[in-house]
Image: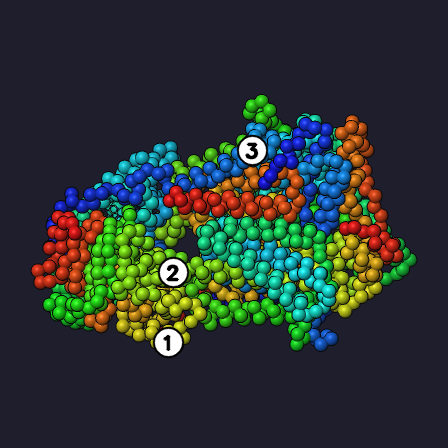
Amino acid sequence: MTTIDATPATNKTPSPTNPRRRVYLPNTKYIPILATLTLLLIMYFTGVANYENFGQPSVVVNLFRDNAVLIVVAVGMTFVIITGGIDLSVGAVISMTTTLTATLLQAGWPPLVVLPAVLLLGSLLGMGMGAVIHYFKVEPFIATLAGLFLARGIALFINQSSIPIRDKLWKAMSEYRIVLADGVVTKITSVTAVVVVLIAAAVLAWTRFGRNVYAIGGNADSALLMGLPVGRTKIAVYTLSGFCAALGGVLFSINSTSGWALQGQGLELDAIAACVIGGVLLTGGSGYVFGSLLGVMVYGLIQTIITFQGDLNAAWTRIIVGLLLFGFIVLQRVVTRRAR
Amino acid sequence: MTIIKHRLFWPSVILVALLVVNMFTANQFITVRDGHLFGVLPDILRGSAPLLLVALGMTLVIATGGIDLSVGAVMAISGAVACLLIKDLGNQNAVGSVLLIMAVAIGASLLLGLWNGTLVAVVGIQPIIATLILMVAGRGVAQLVTDGQIINVQSSPYAAIATGHFLSVPIAFLIAIAAVVLTVLLTRRTALGLLLESVGGSPTASRLAGIRARRITIMVYVVSGGLAGLAGLIYSANIKSADSISAGNLIELDAILAVVIGGTALIGGRFSIAGTVIGAILIQALQVTVVAVGVPSKATLLFKAVIVVALCLSQSTTFRQKVFGRFKSRPAVTAEVPA
Amino acid sequence: MGEPSPVLEMTGIRKVFPGVVALDGVDFRLLPGEIHALMGENGAGKSTLIKVLTGVYDIDGGQITLGGEQVDFTGPLQSQKAGVSTVYQEVNLCTNLTVAENIFIGREPRKFGRIQWGLMRKRAAELLARLDLNIDVSATLDTYSLAIQQMVAIARAVDVSARVLILDEPTSSLDASEVAQLFTIMRRLKDDGVAILFVSHFLDQVYEISDRLTVLRNGQLIGEYKTADLPQVQLVEKMIGKELAVLEDLEDKSQRIRAKTADAAPILAATGLGRTGAISPFDLTIHQGEVVGLAGLLGSGRTELARLLFGADRADSGSLQIDGKDVTLRSPQAAMKRGIAFSSENRRTEGILGELSVRENIILALQASRGWTRPIPRRKQDEIVDKYIKALQIRPADPEREVRNLSGGNQQKVLLARWLITEPRLLIIDEPTRGIDVGAKAEIQKLVAELSDGGMAVLFVSAELEEVLRLSHKIEVLRDRRLVEELENTEGVDADRIMQTIASGATQ
Amino acid sequence: GGGDDSSSGSGSDDKIVLGFSQVGAESGWRTANTKSIQDSAKAAGIELKFADAQGKQENQITAIRSFITQKVDVIAFSPVVTSGWDAVLKEAKDAGIPVILTDRSVDSQDTSLYVSFLGSDFVEEGKKAGQWLVDQYKGKTGTVNIVELQGTTGAAPAIDRQKGFADTIASDPNLKVVKSQTGDFTRAQGKTVMETFLQSTPKIDVLYAHNDDMGLGAIEAIEAAGKKPGTDIKIITVDAVKDGMTALSEGKINYIVECSPLLGPQLMDIVKQVKSGGTPEKRILTKETTFTQEQAKTELPNRQY
Ligand SMILES: Nc1ncnc2c1ncn2[C@@H]1O[C@H](COP(=O)(O)OP(=O)(O)OP(=O)(O)O)[C@@H](O)[C@H]1O
Ligand SMILES: Nc1ncnc2c1ncn2[C@@H]1O[C@H](COP(=O)(O)OP(=O)(O)OP(=O)(O)O)[C@@H](O)[C@H]1O
Ligand SMILES: [Mg+2]
Ligand SMILES: [Mg+2]
C-alpha cells in the first residue's frame, strides 16, 4: 500500500477520454429525439404524397393550433415524468378550468380577474398534490388520481352542461387571426403553446431548477443526499403541471369559447403517451421538452392522416391509429438501437 | 399496535365502513333466498369479479415494473368473440360448445397478452406505450368483430358464469376467488413471486443474478391478458350480450387503483395479492355505496375524491405519524425500545 | 497542549430503527484542523452517526452543536448550507447526469439565472485533474466505473469550502495512487483548518492520515483516542471486542502455493477474447482450485474482463472454452449453467435487491438457476441462509430483514453468500471485500482460500493489491484495458513488482 | 393507408363532397346513425369524408378545420356539446362552406353560422316519457316511486331527457323520483345501478331509463331480483333500438320514446338542396314517434337497427 511512488503520475490514464466516445456521433442522448423527428418527417411526407391538400402549409400550422392544449399540458407533464412522477389530473384540471372560466365570465366577472384566478387555482391544486406526494409519501399515481376526481368533481358540481362564453375579450382572443403568410393563419392559442415550449425548454436546460428535476428523476435518494431541494422541486413540478393544465384549460376555453365539465377526458393519457413517444422515460431522469412536442406532433399527424383518409368508421379509426402508433414506435426503437 | 401498522389495515377499515353503510341502506345485506345468497354483499362480491380478475393480472404486471393499459380492450375482444360464436350455435345452451367457445376467447386473450409481452420484453418498448397500442387498436378490433352493434345471446350456461350460483355462492365470485387462489399458488408456491419481485426491484441486478427476466415479463403480460379475457366473459355474460364499446372501458384505471390501494408500488417490486383483492372489492363497494346512499350524480366524483384522498392519506405512514403522532409524547417512543 | 474548542460536538446521540438500536448515547467531537477517523465493525453505526449529523435521519435523543450553536438539521440541504460537506458511503450521485453536473449540481455557476455550461465543464475538468483524473466531464456518470464515481463524489465534496468534511469510506474501491491523491488533498484542507471525519476499514490508511480516532461498537461509544497512542492490535480489539486471530494463518504464502493443483485440467480458457471499447483481446486460463488475481489501476479493465467471462457483456472477438468445449456466453444464465458465478463490484445497482429480505437475496441466484417451477423448500432455504449468516457473520442476524436496511459491509456479505450457495466451480468476485471490516475481511479471505483448497477456482478482483497478493496463485496484470502480463505468485512477487509491471506497460 | 380514392377530393368534379364529423361510437344507436349516413351518402352519390371524434369536442373542432383545409363542399356534424362552436363555425362561414347540424344542436347566438339543424329534441323526448307516465297515473292516488337511470353525467341527452321528464311529472305531486343515478348509457352500468336501486329502495314502481341499453340492463337486474319487469316495475326508455323494441313487444318494457338514428336520407336531401343553392328550413325535426307494447309488435319486423 505504500508503493505509490512507483507510478509516475504522468504515466497514468494516457487515454484521457473514454475511447467509446471518441468518434463523434450526434451525442447519443439526442438520438431518440432525432429518430423521432426523422420518422415524423417521413410520416408527414407520406401524407403529402398520398393526400391532396396535405402539403398545404396550413396543415402544419393547424397541427399547432389543434394541439395547442395538448402541447401545453405535455410540457408540464414532461417535468413531472422526468422527476419520475406522473400527473393524471391534467384532463380534469382542464375541465375544471373551462367550467369555472365560463361560469365566472357568465356571472360577469372581469376577464382580467378570471384569467389569473383560474391559473392560480390550477397551480394551487397542483401544489397541493405535490405537497401530498412529497410530505406524505403518497404514490403520485394515486394522489393525482384523487386530484382528477376532485377537479372533475368540482367541475360537474358547478355545472353539468356546457356553458357558452360570450365575453368580449375571450371572443376576441378566439377570433383573432395571426397571418403568417398568404392563406396561412394561426391563432393566439398556438402561439401561446409555442412560447410555453420555448420557455419550458430553456428552464429545463439552463436553470438550476431544471437540473434538479433531472437529478431527482435519476435518483431521488441521491439527490437528497447531495443536498438538493428535493421537496421544493417536486412540489414545484406538480405546481407547474397544474399551471400548464390550467393554461391548457384557458386555451381550451378560448378555442371553443365554452366551458364543459367533460372536457379533456382522457387527455392525461394522450399527454403521457406524447411524452413517452417523444423519448421521455417514465422511470424518470431523461427526456426533453422538444421530445414531448414531437410526441404531440406524432399524435396530431396521425389524427390528421385519419381525417384526410376520411372513410374510416370508428372501429377502423382506432385500428389505424393503433397501427400507425405501432409502426412508429417500433421503427423508433429500431433506429435508436442501431444508432447506439 | 402492530395490526394498525399493517399496510392493509386502513383500506380494510374503509371497506368495512362502506359495507356497514350498505348494511343500513339496503333492504337485505345478506340472506338466503331461493337457495342462494342474496343481498347487497353478494351483489358487491359478484359485481367486483371482473375488476378483481383484471386487477389480479395488473398486480403481477406492476410487480415487474410494468403496466397494462390494454385490459379493457382485451375484455371487449374476448366478450365479442365469445358472443359472436355463441350466437351462431345451433343450440346456445349446449354446455360443451359454450365451454369450448369460452376457451377460444380466453385463448385469444392470451395471444393478445403475448403480443404485449413481446413488445415490452423483446422489442423493448416502454410498457405504457406498448400496451397503449393494443388499448387503442384492440377496441377497434372488438367493434369490428361486433360490427359496432351489441350482440345478444340467449345462452343460460354462458349467463351462468356471471349470474349463476354454485353452492349458493355467485359463480362469478367463485371464479374470481379461484383465480386469486391460483395466482397465489402460482406466485407463492413456486419461485415465480420472488423472481417477479426481483425483476421489478432491479432488472439489472436480476439479470446478473441469472434470472430470465424476459421470459418472466412475457409471462405476466400473458397472464394479465388471460385474466382480462376471463373478466370480459363475465362482463358480457352478465348482460348476456357483447358490448364492444363500453366493455372494460376505463377499467385499467380502476384496476391500477385497486392494485395501488392494495399496497403494491407502481415502480415494481413487492406485491400483495391480498391487497389487490381488498382494493378491488373496495372500489366496487364504493360504487355501490354511491348509488345506495343516493349521492346525486353530479356529486359522485366529489364523493369518490374524498374517499380516495382519505385512502391515500391513511396509507401514508408519514401522514399517520404526523397526525396521530402528535397525540403521543416523544418520550413514549423511547420508552418502548428495550422491549 | 490546549485543545481548540470542537467545531462539531455530538452528545448522547441515540438513534433507533425498528428492531435495532443503531446508536446508543454516542458522544463525538471534531476539532478544527484535524482528521478524525471513525472506526468500528460493519453495522457498528458509523454511517448512521454521519446521517444523523447531516440531517438525513431525525435523532431520537441527544444533541448536536456545530460551531458552538445547537443545530437540528432537517435534511442534507440544511447541513450543507451550514458548512458540512459529505461523501456518503454508497456513491450517492445521479448517474443520469454528466460528471460535471454531478460535481456542480446545486451550485452551478450561473449568469442571469442561466447555467454557464462551458465554465462548469472547465472547472469540473480542472478539479478532477487535481485528483489526477482526466475524464470526459460531459459524459454521463453511468459510463464510468464505480471507482471513478467515487472520485467524482469526492471531488464534489472537497470543492465546496466547508467547515466540516465527512468522508464515509471514500477509499473503498480506490487503489493506492488515488488514495494518495486523496490524502494530499485532505492534508491540504486540514492545514486550512477544515475538520475532517474519515471512515475506512483500511487500518493502514487510518494510521497514515488520522490524528485521532473514535471507536464505535454495536452502536455504543467505546472511546476516543489519539491515533499515535493506540497500536493497531489494540484498535482492532476495541473494535471487535476480542482478539483477532484469523489473519495470521493466511500470511504464509508458500503454503498457498503448494496447495495449488498444478496440472489439473483448465476449467476455463479464453483465447483472444475481447470486446471493443471495453477490453482488448486477451488469453487466460483458469484451473480448478486456482485463485487468479486481477491487478491493475482504476479503469484498467478488470471489471470488464470479469464481466466477459460471466456473459454479463458479450464478447465480440476470440473464443472461450469451458471444460475444453467451445462456448459463447450469451447471458449470465449461460455462464451459471456452466458453474460460473459473478459478484459485481457495484453492489447497490447490480447486486442487492433492497426491498427483498436477506433470505431472498441470498437464495436468489440459486433459485434463478433452478427456474421458477422448482422452488427451494422453505426449510432448506432457512437452513442455508442460517448457515451463511453465521459463517459470514451477517448482522443483524435476521434473515427476514430488508437488505437495504443493512449496513454496507453486511450487504456485501449477503451478496457473497448468494454466490457461494450456488456452489460454483469458478467464482468471479469483483471487489468482494469492499467496505468490509477487518474481521470479516479476514474471514472472507480465509473462506476463499478454503474454497480453492476444496477445488473451486476463483477469479479475484480487488483494488487492494496486498489482498490479491495474499490470496492468488497467479496474478494477471492489466493496464489500459489490456492484459499486459501474467505473473506466477512466487516468492519474489510483491506489490512493487506489480506496480512496476503496470508502470512499464510491458505487453503480453 | 391508401388514398387513391381521395384524388377526387376538392370538388374538382361535380361530385359533392360532404365532411361529416360524428360524435363517436358510444352506443349501438350511434353506430346505426353512422351507418345510415354512410349508406345514404353512397346511395345519393355524395362523397363522404367521415371523422369520428371519439366523444371529444377538440377532435371535432380539429376535424371541422381539417374539412375546411380539404375544401369540402358541405360540412355536417353532430356536436358533442352545445356550446363552443362559434369560432370554428365562423371559420367555415368565412371559407364559404355551409354547415348542417345533425342530431344535436348548438347554442350559438348567431344562427347564420349554420344553415340547418336536423335532429331530435331531447327535452321533448323527456317530456313525452313523462307525459305517458302522467297519463298512466291520472286520477290514481298514492305515491309512485320512480327511479331514474341517467345517461353519462354531463352529456347533453342526459341533461335534457332528465329535464324534460322532471318538468312534466311535476304536474302530478304523486310522481316522485326517489333515486336517480348515472348508468353511463351502458347495459352493464344500467344493470349494476339497478341492482343497487333494488337493494336500497323499499319500493320501486317505475323505472325511467335515458336509453334502451340501460333499460335492458336494468331488466336483467329486476329479473334476477325475482320481480317481473313491465309488471312489478313499469319501465320507460328512450331510443327504440331493435333490442329495446323486442323487450317492449315482450312486455318487459312499457313505453319507448323513439329517437331515430336514421338521419342519413334526410341529411343527404338537405345537402343536395344546399349545394344547389336552396335554403332548407332552419330546424328540421326528425320523424319520431313513441311506442306502446302493441305498437311495438307491429313495428318490430321493420326495425333495421
Ligand atoms: N434505514 C435503516 N433501517 C433499519 N435499520 C438500519 C437502517 N440503516 C441502518 N440500519 C441498521 O443500523 C445499524 C448501523 O448501520 P450503519 O450503516 O450505521 O453501519 P456502519 O457502521 O456504517 O457499517 P459499515 O461499515 O458496514 O458501513 C445496522 O445494524 C443496520 O442494520
Ligand atoms: N482513468 C480513466 N479514464 C477514462 N475512463 C475511465 C478511467 N477509468 C475508468 N474509466 C471508465 O470506467 C469504465 C470501467 O472500467 P473497468 O470497470 O473495467 O475498470 P476496473 O479495472 O474494474 O477499475 P475499477 O477499479 O474502476 O473498477 C470504463 O468503461 C471506462 O470508461
Ligand atoms: Mg457504513
Ligand atoms: Mg472494477
Q: Residue furthest front?
A: C325
What is the chain identity of the residue bearing mark 1?
Answer: C
Residue at 83% across, 61% down: D250
Q: The N terminus of chain C lies in which quarter of the figure?
A: bottom left
CA–CA distance in space, label 1 to label 2 = 22 Å
Label 3 amino acid? Ala
The number of numbered badges drawn on the structure is: 3
Rendered location of residue D269, percent (x, y)? 79, 35
Secondary element at tag 2: helix
Residue at 62% in and 44% down? A317
Residue B104: x and y in percent read: 61, 63
Asked if the residue under mark 2 is in contact with the one under mark 3, i.e. CB atoms within 8 Å, the reply is: no
- Specify whether residue C378 is in view: yes
What amino acid is labelled 1 in the image? Answer: Lys
Q: Count residues near mark 1 (Cα–Cα under 10 Å), then give few for <14, some for 14-19, many for 20+.
A: few
- Disc 1 designates what residue? C380
The numbered mark at residue A49 is: 3
- Residue drawn at point x = 61 percent, y = 47 percent: A318
Give the image location of residue D106, x and y in percent.
73, 38
To which residue does mark 2 refer?
A: B206
Q: Are marks 3 and 1 in contact (CB under 8 Å)?
A: no
Which residue lies most toward the top here? A182
Query: Which chain does the residue under circle 3 lie in?
Result: A
**Front in this rendered view, residue C318 or A267:** C318
